Image (cartoon, coloured by chain):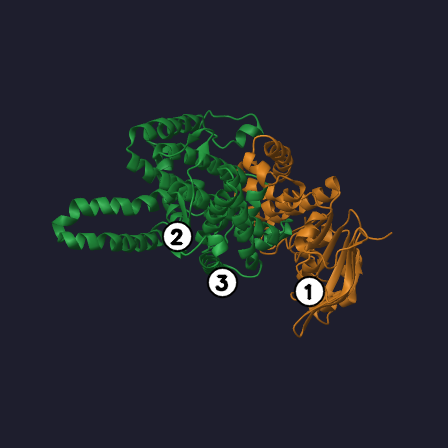
Chain colours: A green, B orange
Amino acid sequence: MIHRECGVLKTTYEADMGLYPLPIAKWTVAALGVLFVVVIPLSLHEYYLSVANLVWIAVIGALGLNILVGYTGQVSIGHGAFMSVGAYTAANLANRLGSPWPVNLLAGGLMAALIGAIVGIPSLRIKGLYLAIATLAGQLIIEWTINHVTFISGGVQASIEVARPRLGPMVLSSQRDMYYFLLVFVVLGIAGTMNLMRTRVGRAFIAIRDHDIAAEIIGINIFRYKLLAFAISSFYAGVTGVLYTYFLGIANYEQFQIGVSIDYLAMIIIGGLGSVLGSIFGAIFVTLLPIVIRYAMEAFGGIFFAPQTVLNLIPNLRLMLFGALIIFFLIVEPEGLNRLWRNIRSYFRVWPFAY
Amino acid sequence: MSGLLEIRDASKSFGGVQAVTRVSLEAQKGEILSVIGPNGAGKTTVLNMISGFYHPDSGRISLEGRDVTELAPSRIAELGVARTFQNIALFRGMTVLDNLMLGRHVHMKTGVLSACAYWGLAQKEEVVHRRRVEDIIDFLRIQDLRRRPTGSLPYGLQKRVELGRALALDPKVLLLDEPMGGCNHEEKEDMARFILDVNEEWGVTVILIEHDMGVVMDISDRVAVLDMGQKIAEGTPDEVRANPRVIKAYLGETKAVPSTGGSRV
């Protein structure tokens, strides 16, 4: 934490517009790189790595949803369905054509982007709650379609098994393999979002969120950019769905129901709307919360309750805490975990002085 | 010679209210044209028709001879018409720099893929346009505000940043809706100086709506007067000042001259 901004002088616009304006940031990134590439995957047990993998998948989905909701200001309760579009596209391609995973991943993302853009069409006319309901309709229609059209769902169970992804001769079967596999997309997703948001297209998204009339007056075609936001965001969702399918080894619509849409909304609200770091914090938090609760209840629940009650409480407690936390963040810190982090950081930035 | 921006016989009504009736205006290239009139005269409606928020019920608007009557606001901005609003329409959460960079939107091309990749084309384009934005920052003397969120700036500076965002479009026509409304004397002087400089040095045609008669009479090349949705007078400031219909619209039946008080710049 011992770093100072004074004396950091920039002589080019390139340097001034860098993602990490301070030299210490490079060291931080390097340290995080070592932590996530070496320390975590090599030291953790398979089970914990599978949890980490769930977090990675959630990070990509949360980033995507944040592009739409946090940055562009358009609500969507349909992201679970967009993920299922990606998942079933990839699963069908893999099983019918035997195409390799990169093709399936891209196709799943693009298909979700297309469907997402279509669901986003009402956003031209309606905002806020009304748009939320329109996207909810999208979620339900997509869910129903996948469930009832056997060409897509592949039969009664509406689930399609998918083979593990391969890298050349290597099959990515263990959790450790999947960890590295997913980490690549997490890094791409984070870098892509950060770059998008500091250039022309991302600025236009934020402009639409902040003041749509002013955005129009400076030449931003609102309709095109809203659809673009839906498409990019749904592309992320589609990719999330494909990755989740490869992670589970099966595409199943039950993994992408409306509860998932809500979970992702919770991630970005708790993490922080309109922030990349917030998406990451939120994804970690919401994914780990039920696991932490279960451990905590197993360890300490016996002190207060009978063993059977503990088992009953665990799933319900998750929901209760979840709701309570969302309310807590909406009231106390609407800008989410990201804001808390920034408060801590700015405290240490000038430490030991007050300002 | 035909004007850079021409409005011919434009009318607009909202429900039963006739906001603008057969108004014709013509802004010549390189002039400052002020539109004045009592509250509710239809000044802002005219501006909104030019920038495409309203489409006139009848009549025609053309820019450089091209019909723009039915175009959407974003298209009209692309053709070189920028504007500011009476009640400031900045992107309040964004920094001054980002607001001005957004003004460059129509001149930039970066798409989604090159933006995500950034290093390469997107970065190059950002730097080119950052240079232009820095020129405007220097011109408006807001160097120290670059990284400030615009929502936190005092009112007068917000007006200045909004002017900067409009200038970042490199407009042919600049529409200013009460740029000095609510500003103190000093801020008004600054703003008037900026408008004159923009007009003289960059050759931008300015259409100005303003209530401060002192400023209007001082900096305008021509003045058009609206009352009750109709144009009642047009001419040089001196002609307009002496026009009995203008005097009547402002002061009722009297022999007095419309206020030249307020601030003289």
What amino acid type is highlighted by mark number 1? Gly
| The N terminus of chain A, quarter of image | top left
| Residue under numbered circle 2 | A260
**Which circle, 2 or 1, is nearer the viewer?**
2
* Residue B91, placed above or below residue B261: above
Q: Residues within 10 Å of mark 1 (few under 14, many from 20)?
A: many
Question: What residue lies at 28% left-to-right and 47% top-to-bottom?
Answer: A290
| The C terminus of chain A, quarter of image | top left
Q: Nearer the viewer, residue B28 or A126?
A: A126
Mark 3 vs 1: CB contact within 8 A: no
| Residue under numbered circle 1 | B42
Question: What residue lies at 65% left-to-right and 42% top-to-bottom?
Answer: B168
Q: Residues within 10 Å of mark 3 (few under 14, many from 20)?
A: some
| Residue under numbered circle 3 | A130
**Which circle, 3 or 1, is nearer the viewer?**
3
Q: Nearer the viewer, residue B72 or B182?
A: B72
Task: Report how far apart the C-alphas of labels 3 and 2 lie in the structure.
Answer: 20 Å
Q: Nearer the viewer, residue A50 or A302?
A: A50
Q: Say the numbered circle drawn on residue B6.
A: none
Tag 3's secondary structure? helix
Q: Can residue B150 be seen in this snapshot? A: no
Q: Quadrant of residue B199?
A: top right
Task: Report how far apart the C-alphas of labels 3 and 1 lie in the structure.
Answer: 33 Å
What amino acid type is highlighted by mark number 3? Tyr
* Residue B197, placed above or below residue A304: above
Residue A297 on image: x %, y % = 20, 48
Tag 2's secondary structure? helix
Q: Earlier in the sequence, mark 3 or mark 2?
A: 3
